[in-house]
Structure formats: structure tokens, C-alpha cells
């Protein structure tokens, strides 16, 4: 599949990324925010045995809220969930969120979040708080995305190697873009695109990330995108989804492009729609796999 211009999640129009980290004596941790100021339909799939998450129940297709304004990924284990408070504050100051009143500022920003375990990389008590999420939003942009030991990947490890942030994108034949951003902090060793292992298995960790597309999807279809995206995680990490990982993938759909069936399914329009969704899911697995490998390559030059 052909990569987008930046080979990054920001190839999806309307998606911005910001990092904030502290890498100094006593500190090695951070936060990454994927912003969608105009909102995006979202889904989630949690596969790891030790997840740390926020607002994932809200993404169930049967629940009320349909769109989110950001996804927050952070180090700091359960303490790092506090970073999402800063994202909520930043969005609320700009009247971005689920409208709950008649005045523009009466909104509730919707910010699902997931965290990874990097506590041993910093002195105890040094972990992301609300200021990390706020600062990550403040520098969020739609251009090239910095990879490696930054943001939520600042204190990450991948097996016996340093982990980090990685991103990738593909553009399908009809022009639809599918992309991903992963914070790789895996228990399992990373397997390169050539099938060769990079490093060796390690201990308590978690790999978390976001898949994004400009296709118009329902919440149920976003969840399907996140579900199949985990195939890419399983290709790149051995083992994946262990009891010591909190492996979690979110999926965002901005809805700028209609989901189009690239192959005619004569007499079966419903099958055609499902085929088009499968094309997106296949792309999602690829960009997740490439993002994981890119993260480790960037963090271990």
C-alpha cells in the first residue's frame, strides 16, 4: 500500500498530534495527544490483561456520545490518567466538546485515554499530571510527527530495547487515508518488517495507540477497525496482549469521505459496504505494524 505524504497519522485531515515530556535527572516520561478539534466518531478495543484506561465504556456503540475531540496517551501508569484532565481543560477553554447547554461554553470535552507502565524510568512520584496533557495540546500540529523517545514514549521500552512513538499511513486506491500512531512499550520483543526479531522479551509494559481515517464510519465500524488493527500489533510484537500488557487501540473516523466499495458486488450492496470496510481494516493492521517498527527504529538509531 502507498504511504501518505508524511507517512504519519497527520496525513488524515483534521488530525493533530502534540507531545510533552520530561527527560532529565529523575524524569523520563511524557504524554501524547491526538487532537480532532472538529470531532471524530470513535471506537476502542482493549486486548491486554492489565489495561489502564479512561472513557472506554462511553465508546460502546449503544451509548449516547457519538464523537470525541481527542485521545490522550500517557506514561505514568494509572497516575498518568491525570494527563487527560489537562486535555479536557484545554478543549473546554476553546468551547470544544459535547454540547450540554445553549451557550457556546457549555460543553463537556470527550477525551478517552490509555496509559502505559514506565514508572521505573523516573524517580517515584515523578509522572505525568494534567499539565502534561495541556502542554501537549498547546503544541499539537498537523505536520510531521516526531517519533522515538518523545511524548508517551519518552520512558517506554520494547522488550530489551528502548521503545517510543511511531506512526505510519497508507492511501487506498480511492484516496481514503488510514493511519496510526503507537506508543510502544511492549513486554514482547519487536519483530521487524523482514520478520527478524529486534531485542528480546522484557517485563511489565503496554502498547497503546490510535488508528485514524478520513472515511465515514459508525461507532461499531470504528470498533471493528480497532479490533483488526490489533492484528498488526500481533505481527510486530511477540508475544502480544499478555497479562502484563494493557494493549489498547482507539479508532477515529473524521467522516470526510464516504466509504466506497472499490470492487463491484453485483446484486449485493450490503456485501460491497462490508468489503470496503475490510479494505480499511486491512490497512489498519498494516499501519499499526509499521508504526511499532518505526517507533523502535527511531528510539534505537
Image (cartoon, rainbow, N blue to C red):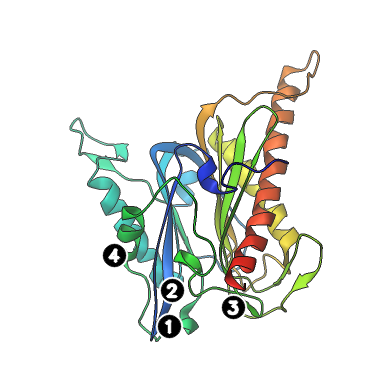
The C terminus sits in image quarter: bottom right
Q: In percent of the image, x 50 and y 76: which residue is there?
A: 118
Q: Position of residue 15 (x, y in %)?
A: 46, 43
Sequence-wise, which precedes: disc 3 or disc 1?
A: 1
Local crowd size for mark 2, using a 10 Å CA cut-off: few (<14), some (14–19), many (≥20)? many
Residue tagged 1 = 122
Check contact, mark 2 vs mark 1: CB within 8 A: yes
The N terminus sits in image quarter: top right
Local crowd size for mark 1, using a 10 Å CA cut-off: few (<14), some (14–19), many (≥20)? some
Numbered disc total = 4
Q: Position of residue 193 (x, y in %)?
A: 76, 59
Local secondary structure at mark 2 = strand
Image quarter for residue 164?
Answer: bottom right
Check contact, mark 4 vs mark 2: CB within 8 A: no
Residue tagged 4 = 131
- Does residue 271 appear left or right of residue 153 in this picture? right
Q: Position of residue 28 (x, y in %)?
A: 44, 78
Asked if residue 180 shows in the view, the reply is yes
Q: What whole-number distance in Å separates the C-alpha atoms at marks 4 and 2?
A: 13 Å
Q: In percent of the image, x 36 and y 80: which residue is there?
A: 126
Q: Which mark is residue 29?
A: 2
Q: In percent of the image, x 30 and y 40: which residue is there?
A: 96
Q: What whole-number distance in Å separates the C-alpha atoms at marks 3 and 2?
A: 16 Å
Local crowd size for mark 4, using a 10 Å CA cut-off: few (<14), some (14–19), many (≥20)? some
In the displayed structure, would residue 277 be above or below residue 227? above
Q: Which mark is residue 204?
A: 3
Q: Position of residue 232 (x, y in %)?
A: 71, 54
Q: What whole-number distance in Å separates the C-alpha atoms at marks 2 and 1?
A: 7 Å
Asked if residue 85 shows in the view, the reply is no
Sequence-wise, which precedes: disc 4 or disc 2?
A: 2
Direction left: furthest residue:
103
Local crowd size for mark 3, using a 10 Å CA cut-off: few (<14), some (14–19), many (≥20)? some
Amino acid at each position: 500500500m502507498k504511504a501518505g505524504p508524511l507517512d504519519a497519522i497527520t496525513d488524515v485531515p483534521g488530525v493533530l498530534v502534540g507531545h510533552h515530556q520530561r527527560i532529565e535527572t529523575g524524569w523520563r516520561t511524557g504524554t501524547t495527544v491526538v487532537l480532532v478539534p472538529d470531532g471524530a466518531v470513535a471506537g476502542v478495543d482493549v486486548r491486554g490483561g492489565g489495561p489502564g484506561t479512561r472513557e472506554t465504556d462511553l465508546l460502546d456503540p449503544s451509548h449516547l456520545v457519538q464523537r470525541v475531540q481527542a485521545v490522550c496517551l500517557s506514561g505514568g501508569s494509572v497516575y498518568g490518567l491525570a494527563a487527560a484532565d489537562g486535555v479536557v481543560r484545554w478543549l473546554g477553554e476553546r468551547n470544544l466538546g459535547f454540547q450540554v447547554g445553549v451557550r457556546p461554553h457549555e460543553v463537556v470535552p470527550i477525551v478517552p485515554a490509555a496509559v502505559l507502565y514506565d514508572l521505573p524510568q523516573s524517580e517515584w512520584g515523578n509522572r505525568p499530571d494534567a499539565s502534561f496533557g495541556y502542554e501537549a495540546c498547546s503544541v499539537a500540529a498537523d505536520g510531521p510527527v516526531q517519533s522515538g523517545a518523545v511524548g508517551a514514549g519518552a520512558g517506554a521500552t520494547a522488550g530489551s530495547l528502548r521503545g517510543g512513538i511511531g506512526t505510519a499511513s497508507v492511501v487506498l486506491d480511492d484516496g481514503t487515508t488510514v493511519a496510526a500512531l503507537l506508543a510502544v512499550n511492549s513486554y514482547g520483543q519487536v519483530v521487524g518488517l523482514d520478520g527478524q526479531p529486534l531485542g528480546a522479551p522484557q517485563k511489565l509494559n503496554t502498547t497503546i495507540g490510535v488508528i485514524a481515517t478520513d472515511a465515514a464510519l459508525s461507532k461499531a465500524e470504528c470498533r471493528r477497525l480497532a479490533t483488526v488493527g490489533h492484528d498488526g500489533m500481533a505481527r510486530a510484537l511477540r508475544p502480544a496482549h499478555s497479562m502484563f500488557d494493557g494493549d489498547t487501540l482507539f479508532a477515529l473516523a473524521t467522516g470526510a469521505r464516504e466509504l466506497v466499495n472499490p470492487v463491484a458486488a453485483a446484486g449485493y450492496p450490503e456485501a460491497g459496504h462490508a468489503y470496503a470496510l475490510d479494505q480499511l481494516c486491512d490497512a489498519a493492521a498494516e499501519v499499526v505494524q509499521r508504526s511499532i517498527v518505526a517507533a523502535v527504529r527511531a528510539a534505537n538509531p
